Amino acid sequence: MKELLLILLQIGFITFLFNYSFYSVVDRWKVKYLNVFEIFSINIIFFINILLFLSLMNLNINSIFFTMLLISFFCIFRNYKKTNIKKDIYYIFFFIVITFLISIDLASTLNLGWDVKYFYYQKTLNFYQNNSLSNLANLIIPDYPHVGALVWSLFWKYPFNYSEYFGRIAYILIYLSSIFTFFYSLKIKHLIKITLIFLTIIVTYNYSLISGLQEVLVFSLVLIASKFAYYLFTEKNDTNKLNFIYFILLITNAACWVKNEALIFLMILNFSLIVFCQIDNQLKLKLFFGSMIIVAARLIFFIFFDTNFVDSQGFNSSEILVNFNFSKIINDLKIILFYYFVYLTQLPIYLIFIPLIISIFIYEKKNYQIKKFILLFTILNFLFLIVAFLFAFEDVMWQVRSGLKRFMFETTGFYLLPILHMLSNKKFKK
Amino acid sequence: MHFKKNIFNNNLFILMIFLFFVFMQKNHIFKKLYDLGSFTLSDRLINVYGYCGKSSYGFLNDVKKKYVSNKNPNIIDYQIRPSSSWTTFDTTKDTADKINIILNYEKKLSLDFRKENNLFINKKNIEHVSGVEAIYINVNQPIQINNLIQIYKVKTNKKILILEKMINETIKDQLVINLNYDTDLINDRWAKIFINIIDLEDKYFEKIDNVNLKLKNKYQINKKDIIFNKGNCYYIR
């Protein structure tokens, strides 16, 4: 009982710290119609970015925690408003119940994933044991992104310092908040909305998501970014559009410090937006240069750790060029494509996406730009996965079997966009 | 929020309840809730990560509690999995220079091979081997072999020869080829190891049941070096 109570308190504490992040005091970035879950997600994005900034300042976890706590109190006192959550109360209750149930799954199963035991856990321990970012240089794969480990260690240590899995409860909250954020604004019957949210959880959730692997964070960030990208297509107000671009850039920055490939996923999303979103050229330039700055910051970090990125990722480009073997490439391509289609069937969102996007293209005559946006992202994402697995690793079969599904899962959130588009579109609603 | 009372909503509500229990059932939430109430965190950790076996969480924690050290233990595991060092790792300490914890120790090491495409491929991977003692070839009918045997592995698409040996023998049921050959190349966490009996005719290949390597163990544990042990897990000097 004591442990169950601690889990509930932990959920409450993380929600508090997430919910009172810097966004609530940045009036310029406010978008009036955002709902409680969207605001919660934006706060999480701010939270992760602030956390990242503090870690890059080489602060240890104690200093980071008290800074975050101060920020939260500052935000409450500066901008205390009695928020009316009466209309959202059922959803909030549902959100907490599901968080609690998944936390029970976590608390009982406990098991850490293979890669987690191999290196993520060491990163988490590094921060938990009060070492700063620079100490990562003494551990394996020092250049690998650390923000997921930082979030984990922060909530492992604070407030209860009970067990490492308490840190992973933060992952559950981020995961669920992204799904609620994605569907909550839909103007459909409440029960349909709850069913949609629940179905998405059922088809995406399994324990491995919270086994310490970072894919769940990338999934959540891509899902939130997709929602804001969707708003860019529907929003008329330029100020709001600019705010959504800032949010997407903050998500891009957070994601690329969670996993390396997340940078590519978000770059593809941003590029697709630049190409097909009908926004002012100035906004497009902001999105472009913002993305470039994020890439540059990540590269500087690699230089800081004196990392040969090419070697660390097993990418033997020079060797591939010297020993170019066309028949092997074809053979590897066959393996990748075979497993790609196998995993498509194992990730239900892809199975839902394919008929939906086809029906949108067939039945919706109006030439919405969002259709092209979804299509371009899908094509570029597919090509990236093929190229990454074709050239990056030594044993393609082994790598594909152990990594491709996880890669594919990370962007599945994006493929929920057709549902959002159809349910927001009057033609399909009739 | 108001739920209209109509058939559509009723059906959706039933669907929701159904989905809720599907979720609970699929993830065994009821059982896990019971486990959470019945077992302490420490019990659950040992259950998940093992005492001596799996990640040997229990054994390593006992060593940490009983024997204070200013260095992280240098751990080797005879089973291939991520190093168990994560269970007790201290990021502020160096790791001991000498191996002092051996997990899932196996005194006698061997490697079985399965038949595939006129080759024999290892059934599992192995580490902590210092050489090959002998090759065992088991047949279901007597055969005459006068061929070169090659043992190699493939890594980064490159063939790495481990050893080769010419044999000219008649095998009735089992042939033991003593080699006493020292090599580190058998040790590999991922790479496939192959045995190829070069130019062996198909009719003879069919008659071979399996091939097995008897291997030399890199580590011998002396009783006087053991500080603490449980099962096949050893804390040594």
Image (spheres, coloured by chain):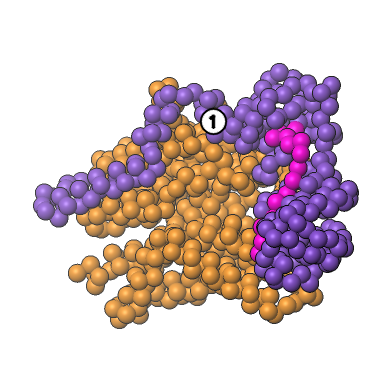
Chain colours: A orange, B purple
Please, which residue is most extreme toward the left here?
B6
Horizontal arrangement in the rendering, residue A212 relative to residue B233 (left or right): left
Residue A387 position within the rendered picture, expressed as x and y whole percent measured from the top left: 62, 71
* Residue at figure coordinates x 69%, y 35% from the top left: B104
Disc 1 residue type (three-letter):
Asn
| Relative to A174, residue A60 above or below | above
Would you identify the image quadrant in which residue B158 lies?
A: bottom right
Quarter holding the C terminus of chain A is bottom left
Residue B41 position within the rendered picture, expressed as x and y whole percent measured from the top left: 51, 26
Which residue is more in the foreground, B5 or A266? B5
- The rendered magenta stretch, by its main secondary structure, is classed as strand
Chain that bears disc 1:
B
* Residue at figure coordinates x 48%, y 71% from the top left: A378
Check disc 1 and report its element: helix, strand or loop: helix
* Residue at figure coordinates x 58%, y 69% from the top left: A336
- Residue A44 seen in this snapshot: no
Residue A388 located within the stretch drawn in magenta: no
Residue range highlighted in magenta: B102-116
- Residue B145 seen in this snapshot: yes
Residue A25 position within the rendered picture, expressed as x and y whole percent measured from the top left: 45, 44
Residue B147 position within the rendered picture, expressed as x and y whole percent measured from the top left: 83, 67
Which residue is more in the foreground, A297 or A165? A165
Residue pointed to by mark 1: B47
* Residue at figure coordinates x 36%, y 75% from the top left: A358
| Relative to A232, residue A205 above or below | above
